[in-house]
Amino acid sequence: MTQQAIFAAGCFWCVEAVFSHIKGVSRATSGYINGTTENPTYKEVCTGDTGHAEAVLIEFDPSLISYETLLNIFFSIHNPTEVNRQGNDVGTQYRTGIYYLDEQQKQLAEQKIAALQPHFEQKIVTEICAAQTFYPAEDYHQGYLLQNPQNSYCNLVATPKFLKAKVKFAELWKEN
């Protein structure tokens, strides 16, 4: 039986690509969460007016990979101390967030942040919120990084993060 996790860590292209290559993850879907507009579009989310975060819904088999391991990956592929940004991507839609689906996920997220905080000079600002409606992003965003390797943003930002995760989590990596 699969479970779900929802994480926001800046642009969803890289986050989705990394998690879709992790053993035990059956699907990673880019989308939008915890905003005020129903069925938001990418253009609307980019204005910052909808309140949504770019996020990834991860479907995983807990007998193959734990939620705690997913949290470890999440915290290693972005900077959890940046408020409403990741590098040059600036706006509330790029915030860092864990959107829990039950109390156990909430507790594990809180414990992980408490354990990691001493290793960061700045405060971890990852929001931990109950998941509201997750809206899948437009089809062209799904699998974007791997389908658009020549895109300049992908070359400069997303691909280096993806390759770093591939090395760091080699034992968990699956070839798609």
Image (cartoon, rainbow, N blue to C red):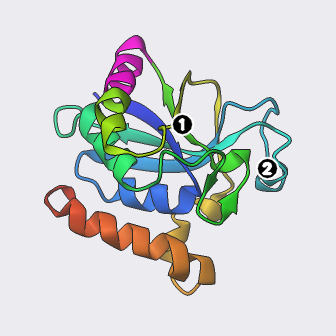
Q: Name the side, left or right, on which 128 lies relative to 90.
A: left
- Report the amino acid beneath label 1: Val
- 161 shown above or below 86: below
Is residue 118 or residue 113 the one in the foreground?
118
Q: Residue furthest top?
A: 103
How far across and how far down the image is residue 128, in percent? 51, 26
Q: Look at the numbered disc 2 and give the secondary structure of its residue.
A: loop
Dot 1: within a 10 Å radius of its alpha carbon, few (fewer than 14), some, or many (20 or more) residues? Answer: some
How far across and how far down the image is residue 110, in percent? 39, 23
Q: Residue placed at 42% from the left, 19% from the top?
A: 106
* Residue span colored magenta: 102-111
How far across and how far down the image is residue 20, in percent? 37, 56
- Report the amino acid beneath label 2: Thr
- 87 shown above or below 64: below
Q: Name the side, left or right, on which 40 lies relative to 149.
A: right
- In the image, residue 107 lies in the stretch drawn in magenta: yes
Q: Name the side, left or right, on which 45 lies relative to 140.
A: right
Residue 70, by quadrant, is top left
Res 119 visible: yes
Q: Residue placed at 48% from the left, 45% from the top?
A: 80
Q: Main secondary structure of the magenta part?
A: helix
| Label 1 – label 2 distance at C-alpha | 26 Å
- Residue marked by disc 2: 41
Res 176 visible: no
- Residue marked by disc 1: 125
Dot 2: within a 10 Å radius of its alpha carbon, few (fewer than 14), some, or many (20 or more) residues? Answer: some
The first of marks 1 and 2 along the sequence is 2
Q: Residue placed at 19% from the left, 55% from the top?
A: 172
Residue 175, by quadrant, is bottom left
Q: Residue furthest left?
A: 171
